[in-house]
Image: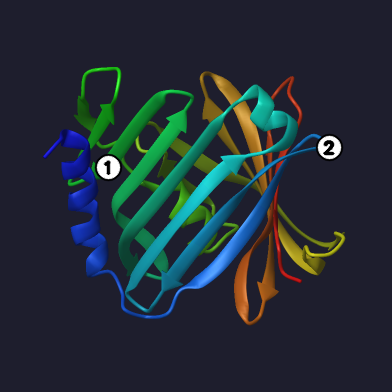
Amino acid sequence: MTSARILVAAFLLLAAGATTHAFEKLVYDARVGWIEAGSIEMIANRTADRFYIAGSVETKGVIRRLIKWRGSFSAVGSIVDGEPEGEAYLLLEEKGDEREILLAANKKTVIYSNNRPTQIMDHPGGNDLMSSLFLGRHCFERRVVHDGEDPYELELNRISTTEIFEPKPYYRGATTRCDYQYAYKERVRRVSVWVADVEGVSRPVRIRVRVPFRPDGVLRLRTR
């Protein structure tokens, strides 16, 4: 069995015991500036003490002609004091002919690539970004999240209430806006998350990432 298959098998063993409850499907469309960039399709489940989330990301349109990239992710773990606490995070990426598999679990991160030696490093600490962003509570004061390799400390700047007016099929109505900042490569970047009640569940309905000297990246949840 190859190293990559061992990584995937190890994650599936963890995920198998995560939950037997029904999943819900979430779809977020991505935009960079005014250009449609792709989408994130997810299935997620959260119970009183466990969670599981998995999804795929794929570029499209003009962005796809420039960057042929797609990826899949999964995360599994416990709910501690109402917040997801990851036990394992799996990321599979494809860019052209390159393939990479990352597994962050058991205090280690292992990266297998089809054109580079396997890397083993210390776990970056904190919780994975995807479960924190899509399953966690928002407007927290401070939280460390990671992408499997690097940690990022999100710090709350401001909380406000506002209405958003998106066309169908996206959410329209009252929201709580949480503005965060984090440091990346010695630059401060900003993330805004609009949270609303959707069918009795509080979840992000719009996410905006601001990168200096580049168009904003925006995710919008399909709700209608």
Locate the N terminus by quadrant: top left
Q: Quadrant of residue 151?
A: top left
Element type where label 2 sits in the image: loop
Tell which circle, 1 or 2, labels the residue nearer the N-terminal end. Answer: 2
Q: Nearer the viewer, residue 96 or 216?
A: 96
The count of marks equals 2
Q: Is residue 202 above or below residue 156?
A: below
Q: Could one spot residue 47 in this view of the protein?
A: yes
Residue 101 horizontal/vertical position (percent): 31, 36
Query: In the image, 136: left or right of 67?
Result: left
Between the C-alphas of marks 1 and 2, the distance is: 34 Å
Residue at x 44% of width, y 32% of height: 94
Q: Is residue 203 left or right of residue 173?
A: left
Q: Amino acid at mark 2?
A: Trp
Q: Which residue is mark 1?
A: 104
Q: Position of residue 40 (x, y in %)?
A: 58, 51
Q: Is residue 210 left or right of residue 152?
A: right
Q: Which color scheme does this rendered protein use?
A: rainbow
Horizontal side of 170 relative to 209 (left or right) equals: right
Task: Identify the residue under disc 2.
Answer: 34
Single out the residue that lies furthest toward the left: 1
Question: Closer to the camera: disc 1 or disc 2?
Answer: 2
Residue 18 position within the rendered picture, expressed as x and y whole percent measured from the top left: 28, 69
* Label 1 crowd bin: few (<14), some (14–19), many (20+), radius 10 Å: many
- Percent across and percent down for residue 62 are 74, 30
Kind of residue at badge 1: Ala
Depicted 150 relative to depicted 158: above or below: above
Circle 2 Cα neighbour tier, 10 Å, few/some/many (<14 / 14–19 / ≥20): few
